Structure formats: structure tokens, C-alpha cells
Amino acid sequence: MTYAPKQLKKLHNYLKDKTGLSPAALGIVGDAAHRGGYHCGRDRTVSGDYSVVESSRDRRGLSNAASAIDIGGFAKNGKTLRGLSLWLVGQCRKSAPGTEDIREIIYSPDGKRVKRWDRLGKRSSGDDSHLWHTHISYFRDSEGKDKTALFKRYFGGSDSGSKNPSRPSRRPAPKPRYSFPLPGGYYFGWAHWGNESISGWYGTRFKGVSSRTWLKRFGSQLSKRGWPVGKGRKYLRRFGNDGKYGDEWDHLARAFQRDQGLAVDGLIGPATWRAAFRNPIT
């Protein structure tokens, strides 16, 4: 039976205190007739439910836990729902700390239009009910992770005074942390996809380093992050980390993008590169 997990209830209680909203205006679990979506657990999912099929993080973490919260309209101490919503979306777009587990935010920037920030880039809007409340979905594998820290930054709180701080649940990305080496609009991908697609096959150089070496650095970084990369292993099994983009590199890039909640296209652009060299290891 779908239930409200501990960390979402903790966020619910925090927001109730900070916004003055009644418990009913902070919804976690949908009503009994609700089927599908992040408000529902395994017992209420439907065939092809986007909250399960589009991300390996959701499939991996699927349980009977709800994974979303709705926040109703409020105005308290200079803080408002609209202000909170715009701030949250801005933080997500910057991949700020505390946003890595958010799948989507459905909100209204002006009370007239409904917009959606979707980490996977599949949707851009929602129904009109979101003119009056903001919906936040979390990847299902984040059920046990704290969700209040991000909101504490907005409302002016802090975890620094805790007498018993929790141990960090994420490890920083391994060093060295190279910035994306290609010019704007370029990416690592298939050799036959035009000038903007850099494959490592032709000896081109960027920032004084060959494109093949840059691609090998990406493969090495995933190996440092714990991915089984190299000859005879799960990824790059046949040719190893050769820095020449082909089928195996496409398979590796897509698997990593799914794991990180990115748009899955197999092409290694700035977002995929940044996730490898900057995102913490969870």
C-alpha cells in the first residue's frame, strides 16, 4: 500500500512550520483513486507509468513509497510559493547541491501559465491545478535521503548547528576535474555526424590535447567512479578505453546518462561531462 516515507514526512513537517500551511495543503500521497505518477507507490503504478519507465533511478528504487510533494499557496515572512518555486527551478538548472534527487518541478511563474522543469527534458507543462500549487517529484531511489537541506537554504535555516550531524551520503567526484574541453555546440559522438561531433578518430586537438585523449579521460573518470570500464568488463569490453567513439562508447554514455537522470542520447556534451567530473558519487 502506498505510504509517505520518513524523509518526505520530515520535509512536510518542515514546510508546515515555515509556510504556515495546513497539513492538507502539503500533499504527499494521492487519494485512493489516484493511479500512476510519483504520488503513488508500486501498488498504484500503471503500465508505461513515466514515473517508472523513463529512468533507471526510478526502476531501481521502486517501492510502495510516494515520491512527490505538493505545496499550496502561501505568503509568510516575505516568502511566497511563487518565489520558492522560481528559486527551486533556478537551483535545479544550476545543479546546485541538494537538487540531484529532484526529477521534476511543475509550477506557475505568474499564476497564468503552468511550466515544468524536467531533469530528463521530456515535458514542459502540466495541468491547470498547478496554477495554485507546486509539485515536486523525487527520483524513487532517493527515498531514504534527506530532502530538507535545499529548502533550509531558501528559508534561511542551516544544518550547521546540529549537535549530531549526519555523515555525508555522497562522495565527491574523483580528481582531476577537467572542464568540458570542446567549443560551444560541439560534443563527443559519432564520426559521421558532422563537424560538431568529435569522435577521437582524426587526431583533432582541443586545449592542446588530442580529442582521443580527452575521450579516454572521460572513460577513466567513469572507472574512478566505480563503473566497470575496460577490456573484458561490462563497458568498452572489446576494445577497452581507446578514445575512439563507436557502439561501445554510445552504450556507456547512455548508461551513465540514465544513471544521472540526464537526457539519454549517447552523446557526451557539457552536461554529461560535468556529471562525470563534478557530480558527487551516490
Image (tube, rainbow, N blue to C red):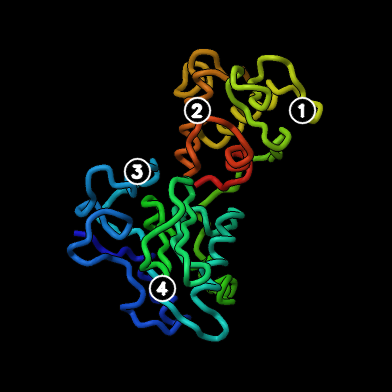
Sequence order check, earlier mark of 4 and 1 = 4
Q: CA distance from mark 1 to mark 2?
A: 23 Å
Q: Which quadrant of the rendered structure holds the N terminus? A: bottom left
Sequence order check, earlier mark of 4 and 2 = 4
> Which image quadrant for residue 219?
top right
Q: Which residue is mark 2?
A: 252
Sequence order check, earlier mark of 1 and 3 = 3
Amino acid type, residue under disc 3 in the picture: Arg
Sequence order check, earlier mark of 4 and 3 = 3
Q: Which residue is mark 1?
A: 206
Sequence order check, earlier mark of 1 and 2 = 1
As helix, strand or loop, the secondary structure at mark 3 comes to helix
Which numbered circle lies on residue 132?
Answer: 4
Q: Which residue is mark 3?
A: 60
As helix, strand or loop, the secondary structure at mark 4 comes to loop
Crowding around mark 1 (Cα neighbors within 10 Å: few <14, some 14 to 19, many 20+) is: few
State the residue at coordinates (38%, 50%).
141
Q: Position of residue 227 (x, y in %)?
A: 50, 32
Q: Position of residue 214 (x, y in %)?
A: 69, 27
State the residue at coordinates (31%, 78%).
24
Which residue is nearer to you in this view: 80 or 111? Answer: 111
Sequence order check, earlier mark of 3 and 2 = 3
As helix, strand or loop, the secondary structure at mark 1 comes to strand
Crowding around mark 2 (Cα neighbors within 10 Å: few <14, some 14 to 19, many 20+) is: some
